[in-house]
Every structure is written in structure tokens, then in C-alpha cells.
């Protein structure tokens, strides 16, 4: 599946890009919210499973309206625990560490920060998980998913469409890289995607990407380590990265990366 082969449905705020795999459709909801959220709906035989939740009230309403003729069997809540007014009666699935991440860990800190930044338009309520799941195969709505636990939460493999969902990739934007060891771990994970030959890589803050994008990110991470090793200060490190990647978005992520490398 080519990442650019989709049908687009324009909505009032966001847009839906629909990938047709035959028996299965992937609806990739681009929210156009302040943090560029993406939400994914995997549909088969009129039933659907959602991966992640929108977290601004207007997006909650817009996506609910879009789904009115689709029977939603469950929502996988991994890294984005906020937005609990969205489909409150639908079963919510998460690993135990994802539950802790959203209620007490790094996810909770992000929710607090977003609440302070965006105020009443942001749905800070946290989804109550009805079904705690473990790593391995889980079937929801007749669709198989492979749950891969991560340090914070979990990634999701979708075998029927040969896709993987993870939190972040972004081939032309900066990422939060917590030092050289973290860069190596990210690189190893991306190389595993290439080895497995996924057609699409789905992430929470970017439109669907492919294996060329994964290689681009690997090259970026390797170069980031080289720049850091040759820099005498945080200021020099950041200046060199900006110089070499002038078109990259996510400057706030780069700022955090600088702190990790030069704390």
C-alpha cells in the first residue's frame, strides 16, 4: 500500500484519509488540532476498532459524527489517555503500564501541561480502561492486533493491513531523543520495521509513513549522535542540528533533545 494512495474526506476541522485494503479499510483522521494528533480507525465488515483518542472537544464531536454509521467495538488507548468524553460507552483497551502512564506517569504530566496551555477546549478527562490487555495477540471486532509493550505504553501491529502503530516517527521533524542510548534504541526499532517490511507506519502526530521514511529517520538519528559527539556545548549542538536540518519542524522537541544530550 502506497502511503499516498487514499481517498480524502474533508471535515469541518480535520480531514479523513481512507486507505482501502479490500476487506479492511483504514481511516486516518488528521485532527488539525494544536498538537497535530492523528487517530486511526480500522474497519472490517462494518465494525471498527479505534487506535488512540482525540483530545479536543471539537474533534471528539466531529469524529463521533463521522462514525455514526460504523459500529465501534473498542478503542486502544496507548499514549493518549485524555479525551474521555469521546465515545464514553465503548470498551477501552490498554496494557497496565499504559494505564499508569496516563494516570500517574509521563502521560499525566503531558495532560496537565496541555490543560494549562489550552484551557477549556482541551478534554483533560482520562479514559477509564475497561479491558486490561497483555503483550501478544488480541482480537477485537473480528480484527486481530499484536500488542507490543513499550517502556511507556504499547505499540500495535495490524497484520491484516501489514501496518504498525507507534507513538512517533516523523521523517522530516525533530523528535525527543533522550541521549545516544535512546537514539540507538529508536534506530533498532526502526530497523526491525524495515526487516519486517511493513507497508505503513502509523503514528500519533503524523500522517502514515513508509519504510523510506523509517530509513530517513535512522539516518537522522545516527547523524544526531555524531553532531552531539563533536559539539563542545548545548548551544553548538543545537546550532549544528538546525543548520543541517533547516526545514525540520518540531523545534520544541529539539530543545528537549539538547537538554538530554547536554544535561
Image (cartoon, grey):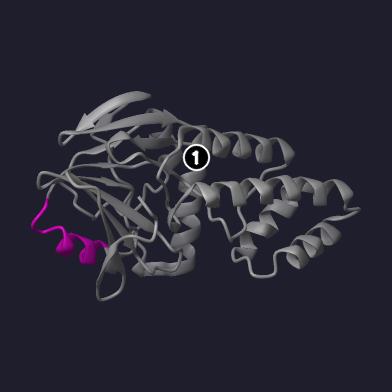
Note whether 53 is above or below 118 in the view shown.
above
Q: Left or right: where does residue 220 sit relative to residue 10?
A: right
Note whether 227 is above or below 159 in the view shown.
below
Q: Which residue is mark 1?
A: 105
- Element on which disc 1 rests: loop
Q: Residue shown at 34%/29% (left/top)?
A: 146
Q: Residue shown at 80%/65% (left/top)?
A: 239
**Position in image of residue 12 (x %, y %):** 25, 76
Between 42 and 76, which is closer to the camera in this rendering? Answer: 42
Q: Left or right: where does residue 136 sit relative to residue 45?
A: right
**Position in image of residue 62 (x %, y %):** 22, 67
Q: 10 Å neighbourhood of mark 1: few (<14), some, or many (≥20)?
A: some
Q: Residue shown at 49%/52% (left/top)?
A: 110
Q: Left or right: where does residue 208 sit relative to residue 7?
A: right
Q: Looking at the image, which residue sits at the far right?
A: 232
Kindly tell me whether residue 85 is visible in this rendering.
yes
Instruction: Judge whether residue 61 is colored magenta.
Output: yes
The residue range painted magenta reads 60-70
**Position in image of residue 43 (x %, y %):** 19, 47
**Position in image of residue 183 (x %, y %):** 67, 41
Instruction: Judge whether residue 182 is colored magenta.
Output: no
Question: Magenta span: helix, strand or loop, mainly?
Answer: helix
- Quarter location, residue 63: bottom left
Q: Left or right: where does residue 225 sit relative to residue 80?
A: right
Between 187 and 127, which is closer to the camera in this rendering? Answer: 187
Between 69 and 22, which is closer to the camera in this rendering? Answer: 22
Kindly tell me whether residue 134 is visible in this rendering.
no
Q: Looking at the image, which residue sits at the far bottom?
A: 12
Amino acid at each position: 500500500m502506497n502511503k499516498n494512495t487514499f481517498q480524502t474526506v474533508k471535515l469541518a476541522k480535520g480531514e479523513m484519509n481512507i486507505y482501502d485494503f479490500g476487506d479492511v479499510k483504514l481511516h486516518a483522521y488528521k485532527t488539525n488540532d494544536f498538537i497535530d494528533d492523528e487517530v486511526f480507525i480500522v474497519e472490517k465488515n462494518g465494525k471498527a476498532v479505534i487506535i488512540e483518542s482525540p483530545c479536543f472537544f471539537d474533534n471528539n464531536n466531529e469524529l463521533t459524527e463521522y462514525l455514526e454509521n460504523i459500529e465501534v467495538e473498542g478503542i486502544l488507548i496507548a499514549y493518549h489517555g485524555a479525551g474521555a468524553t469521546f465515545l464514553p460507552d465503548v470498551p477501552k483497551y490498554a496494557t497496565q503500564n499504559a494505564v499508569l502512564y496516563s494516570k500517574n506517569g509521563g502521560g499525566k504530566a503531558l495532560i496537565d501541561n496541555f490543560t494549562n496551555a489550552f484551557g477549556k477546549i482541551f478534554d483533560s478527562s482520562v479514559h477509564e480502561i475497561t479491558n486490561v490487555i497483555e503483550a501478544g495477540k488480541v482480537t477485537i471486532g473480528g480484527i486481530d492486533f499484536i500488542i507490543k509493550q513499550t517502556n511507556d505504553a504499547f505499540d500495535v501491529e495490524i497484520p491484516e493491513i501489514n501496518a504498525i502503530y507507534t507513538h512517533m516517527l516523523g521523517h522530516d521533524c525533530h523528535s525527543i531523543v533522550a541521549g545516544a542510548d535512546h537514539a540507538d534504541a529508536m534506530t533498532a526499532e526502526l530497523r526491525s520495521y524495515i526487516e519486517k517490511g511493513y507497508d505503513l507506519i502509523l503514528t500519533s502526530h503524523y500522517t502514515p509513513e513508509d519504510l523510506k521514511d523509517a530509513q530517513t529517520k535512522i539516518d537522522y538519528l545516527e547523524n544526531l549522535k555524531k553532531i552531539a559527539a563533536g559539539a563542545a556545548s548545548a548551544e553548538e549542538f543545537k546550532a549544528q542540528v538546525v543548520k543541517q536540518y533547516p526545514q525540520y519542524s518540531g523545534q520544541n522537541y529539539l530543545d528537549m533533545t539538547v537538554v538530554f544530550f547536554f544535561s
